[in-house]
Amino acid sequence: MEYSFPKAKEPIPSAKKDDLILVAGAGGFIGGNLVAYFKDKGFTRIRAVDKKPLGEWYRVTREADNLCLDLSDEDNCDKAAENAFEVYCLAADMGGMGFIERHRVDCLRSVLINTHLIQASWRAGAKRYFYSSSACAYNTELQKDPHVRALKESDAYPAMAERGYGWEKLISEMFCQEYWAERGLATFIARFHNVYGPYGTWIGGREKAPAAISRKVIEAKDRNTGTIDIWGDGTQTRSFMYIDDCLEGIDRITHCDELVATPINLGSSELIEINNLVTIAEGIGGVKLKRTYAPSQPKGVAGRNSDNTFIKQVLKWEPSTSFKVGLEKTYRWIEKQYFDRKAGKSNVD
């Protein structure tokens, strides 16, 4: 069962343009884009933190205070959270389904990040704390059919999350709720549904389906192979959320006092079959490929979609970028990265 937590009795303070915002995991796809989002909104004090060397960050905002710290270490969390008014925890060891299924220990160890960072944020007197959870926290027994019904927030319990990554997300959600209930730190929790877009992982094994399929189509077209390899049987279904919708959703959720300590779906409700994803990518690339399937490769649950009833009720908003529009932008960005890499250019976006 899920527990209900007290709502805020008084308005929770929000950061002003000169208050310090901490973005943890800023070297990653969503975190890097979130730093740029806040900079574009006029915030002048942004601390961006990631354990990767700065040269390996997916997107760097030079105006931010960019720090390389491993946030699984408690002392580093204290350094990162010092004087922070709002904290956004997007730091985690994760990737697409191939990474999640093959590196469960690494995914589970991400619990150290949220454990230490939420404690450090509370000690530092932060007013709002955002935690990036995942649809992998949902009960996998409800996701065995490609024609799955959309998952609503209550479907996380009784708990039977994705092994490794999903369980880490679920226990970290609990930390956020209890820090609000016992210690008064206003926490906000969004369950992401497959975020994609420019400045994301597109090669190396951590990429998700939209980026992986886009790259494979680009490679097949460039090498004139005429074929594409698809993990699973192609009938798996997912909803995919474009990065711009994700950033706006994070902002809206974190600044809605009604959602304090309340997990909420943040995803598109447009259900896409992987075979259809390939068809759309082929259309963007202007090519038709012979498909081969690899059923033994990691493929995740059979189907997963976001029920957006709650977010529409509370925020009067939901992610709205159509998959075709979002994939076109993502494909073109990956295409540029691919050919820049092929040409030996080091300063790819």
Image (tube, grey):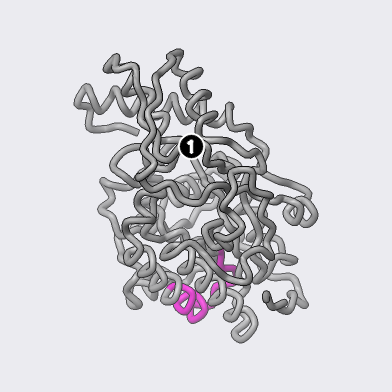
**Does residue 331 sit above or below 306 in this rendering?**
above
**Residue 13 coordinates in the image, percent (x, y):** 67, 68
- Name the amino acid type tagged 1: Gly
Residue at 54% across / 67% down in the picture?
A: 160
In the depicted structure, whether residue 133 falls above or below residue 11: above
Taking 232 as reference, is 344 left or right? left
Viewer-nearest residue: 12 or 268: 268
Region rendered in magenta: 117-130
Residue placed most toward the observer, 9 or 332 = 332
Q: Observer-nearest residue: 221 or 62?
A: 221
- What residue appears at the point 62 percent right and 71 percent down from the top-left corner? 158
Residue drawn at x 53%, y 64% is 131
* Image quadrant assignment for residue 106: bottom left
Q: Secondary structure at mark 1?
A: loop
Seen in the picture, residue 292 relative to 135 is either above or below; the reply is above
> In terms of depth relative to the viewer, which is nearer, 242 or 143?
143
Is there any visible trace of residue 20 in the rendered image?
no
Quadrant occupied by the N terminus:
bottom right
| Residue drawn at point x = 19 percent, y = 26 percent | 344
Q: Which residue does the numbered mark 1 point to in the structure image? A: 197
Decide whether residue 71 is among the magenta residues: no
Image position of 115 (left or right of 7): left
- Give the x, y percent position of residue 98: 36, 49
Q: 10 left or right of 303?
A: right
User: Can residue 339 be seen by looking at this rendering?
Assistant: yes
Place of residue 154 in the rendered image (x, y in percent of width and height, measured from the top left): 69, 65
Label 1 Cα neighbours within 10 Å, binned few <14 / some 14-19 / many ≥20: many
Q: Position of residue 60 (x, y in %)?
A: 37, 45
Task: Determine the image quadrant of residue 178.
Answer: bottom right
Question: In which quadrant is the C terminus drawn?
Answer: top left
Does the stretch in magenta take in 119? yes
Residue furthest out toward the bottom = 182
